[in-house]
Image (cartoon, helix red, strand yellow):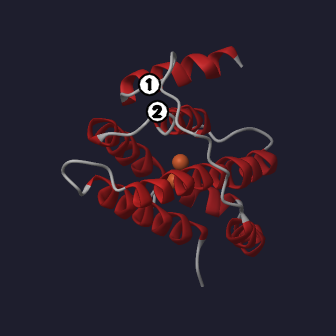
Amino acid sequence: MTSIRQALESDHRRLEALLEKAMAPRDRIDELAYRELRAGLLRHIGIEEKILLARARHRLGAPLSRARQLRIEHGAIASLLVPTPDHALLRELAALLADHDAVEEGEEGVYAECEAILEDERESILEAIRNYPVPRLNPHYDGPNTHRTAREALAASARQRFRE
Ligand SMILES: [Fe+2]
Ligand SMILES: [Fe+2]
């Protein structure tokens, strides 16, 4: 039986492999791999926010203690997907994802925490994950207020959350 944790951790591995593939050519970005990564990451974040964190919050009557930090990081990850990618940008994304995914994975991670809270909803959650749509991608934007480092992206995302 697949657990929610297994499903989402294996999606992390899939996305890591795509990121590696996107960065593999020395002189360019593998566009096909990058496009799949971009769509896959936005979908993955959507699943976590709209299904997992949302249902845990509903069940508990309050957000998980680590939800706010995860949402800030999701905002930062999504913002690094806005500008046209190069190797430096994708290295920033890789570093941010490594830290972020570590908080979600493992025995003490947020996935396991959600799984325990939502044990009796497992089948319906796995079904909702399977059916979650791939988002439509906007063209890249390189104008003002775009971020190319994890640090900048995190700071901007935290400011945004603070205003909400
Ligand atoms: Fe996440
Ligand atoms: Fe994740």
Q: Quadrant of residue 139?
A: top right
- The amino acid marked with disc number 2 is Pro
| Res 58 seen here | yes
Look at label 1 and name its amino acid: His
Q: Nearer the viewer, residue 29 or 60?
A: 29
Give the residue at x 77% y 68%.
121
Question: Which percent across, then down, holds residue 81?
Answer: 49, 39
State the residue position of label 2: 83
**Which tag, 1 or 2, sits closer to the chain's start?**
2
Quadrant of the frame with the N terminus:
bottom right
**Mark 1 nearby-residue class (10 Å; few <14, some 14–19, many ≥20):** many
Asked if disc 1 and disc 2 are in contact, CB closer than 8 Å, the reply is: yes
- Of the 4 image quadrants, the one containing the C terminus is top right
Kind of element beneath mark 1 = loop
Q: Quadrant of residue 159?
A: top right
Q: Position of residue 142 (x, y in %)?
A: 47, 26
Above or below: residue 158 compared with residue 75: above
In the displayed structure, would residue 74 be above or below residue 24? above
Cα gap from disc 1 to disc 2, whole angstroms: 7 Å
At x 54% / y 22%, what residue is drawn?
158
Q: Residues within 10 Å of mark 2 (few under 14, many from 20)?
A: some
Residues 117 and 161: in front is 161
- Percent x, y for residue 154? 46, 26
- Give the labeled residue for mark 1: 147
